[in-house]
Amino acid sequence: MAAEPKGQPTHGRPAPHPTANPEAVRPGTPGAGENICRRCGGAGTVEGAPCPECGGTGKVVTPVGGG
């Protein structure tokens, strides 16, 4: 079994794709909103299949900046 990257536990999940959505959070997270999926560019598909990052929606939930 490969070691998990330091500071980024995967909890048994596969490591994200290098162009994935590193800021994605669970829906319903306070201070978060929809954003376009970086992996599929909002298309919802990758190589003719549903995007594994957004589940085919073309959108992910990410924190909304503020100050």
Image (cartoon, rainbow, N blue to C red):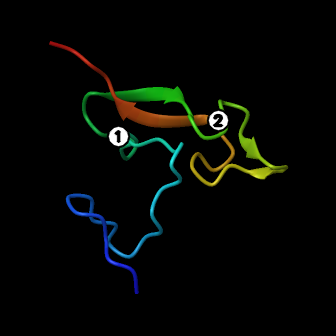
The count of marks equals: 2
Q: Amino acid at mark 2?
A: Gly
* Element assignment for label 2: loop
The answer to whether 64 appears left or right of 34 in the picture is left
- Rendered position, 47 above or below 32: below
Image quadrant in which you'd find residue 15: bottom left
The answer to whether 21 appears left or right of 63 in the picture is right
**Residue at 67 percent of width and 38 percent of height:** 40
Screen quadrant of the N terminus: bottom left
Residue 58 position, x and y percent, is 64, 35
- Tell me which numbered mark, 1 or 2, is placed earlier along the sequence: 1
Badge 1 vs badge 2, beta-carbon distance below 8 Å = no
In the rendered image, which residue does mark 2 sit on? 58
Residue furthest to the left in view is 67
Residue 64 position, x and y percent, is 31, 23
**Residue at 63 percent of width and 55 percent of height:** 52
Screen quadrant of the C terminus: top left
Image quadrant in which you'd find residue 41: top right
Q: Which mark is residue 8?
A: none
The answer to whether 43 appears left or right of 52 in the picture is right
**Residue at 22 percent of width and 63 percent of height:** 6
**Residue at 81 percent of width and 49 percent of height:** 47
Local crowd size for mark 2, using a 10 Å CA cut-off: few (<14), some (14–19), many (≥20)? many
Residue furthest to the top in view is 67
In the rendered image, which residue does mark 1 sit on? 28
